[in-house]
Amino acid sequence: MRRALWTARVLACLAVLVLPAAPLRAADLPPQPRLTGDTRIHDPSVIEVDGRYAAFGTGEQGIYRGAIKVKTSPEGVNWTDAGAIGKGVPKWAIGSLGYQPTNVWAPSVSRRGGTVFLYYCLSSFGSNASAIGLMTNASFDARKPGEGWQDQGLVLMSTPRDDFNAIDPFRADASDGRAYLAFGSFWSGIKLRELDPATGRLIKEDTPTFALAGRQGGAVEASSILEHQGKFYLFVSFDQCCKGMASTYNIRVGRADRIQGPYLDRDGKDMAQGGGSLVLATTGRFIGPGGQEAVKTSKGDMLAYHYYDADDGGASKLQFSPLFWTADGWPELGPL
């Protein structure tokens, strides 16, 4: 009997010793990288090609005629300004929209086979008379990111008669070979439509529109979708951008079994009904983080976003950080 009791106690102790370790808390994760060089950018989208990185961002009014800005990096940490993409707002804009936008907004870059796709949008603040366009590049070189682009024109637009806003495009290429365009800001929120993977245009003009996230007309935008271990993760920005140190942007996420949704947050709330688990908010000098895009790289899953630097007058700057995954499958960022 005594031996049996002793054996039971030993086995109980061993069971305690081999229990799985508790998942790391965000504070225990490695800190986010400290980027160097010229990191001034807004609404960043990052691509890795042949081990080098390029980041594309919203054009500035009066500089390069509002053309898409681009930065390059040999390893994703030290960044150099590389000028602009194209010649500013495309000629087709005024005919489609009825007015001339002053700059090109929120580019989103991705690659399918040997072609690099660069979606962009044209709009004005407070209006949903907006358009999403596309450029393609069959010979993209991250060392010369301004070369080789061909504008493919209009992909999708919205008018004041619509309940959505055709801005903040993001192309998602799913593991089943299909491709989708996520887009939207304010109004009725984030939408999803299927693309022809080869052309980058809508697969059909009447392809279904899926509602992914909304806040009853409130601030939700900058959607991107990441596929991870059979699940789909929708990242969005809540609240206000573009106000320097007064910005209130913050990054949220939800998860779905299908790319079309529904996307639920950690508490089970549907993002279409205002849900969204917090990933990152203002921290110290890093004001209003948002405008994010998730991207797969040779280093693993990464998140590119901008923040307003309180130590530099509220200048908008790039952050490019690894995503870590909790034991129950949620993405986290290390501390700033």
Image (tube, helix red, strand yellow):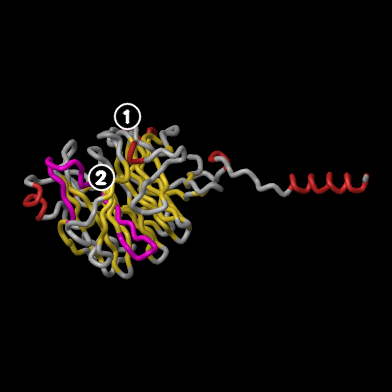
Quarter of the figure with residue 277: top left
In-image side of 263 versus 120 (left or right): right
What's drawn in magenta, residue-wise? 155-179
Q: Nearer the viewer, residue 240 or 80?
A: 240
Name the residue furthest top.
246
Question: Which residue occupies the foreground of this view, 190 or 71?
Answer: 190
Mark 2–mark 1 CB contact (< 8 Å): no
Counting from the top left corner in percent of width and height, residue 4 is at 89, 48
User: Can you identify the residue that label 2 sits on?
Assistant: 184
Task: Determine crowd level at label 1: few under 14, some 14-19, many 20+ residues with C-alpha closer than 10 A.
Answer: some
Magenta span includes 163 = yes
The residue that label 1 is drawn on is: 246
Residue under the point 25% across and 60% down = 195
Q: Is residue 283 magenta?
A: no
Residue 37, relative to residue 336: is it above or below? below
User: 10 Å neighbourhood of mark 2: few (<14), some, or many (≥20)?
Assistant: many
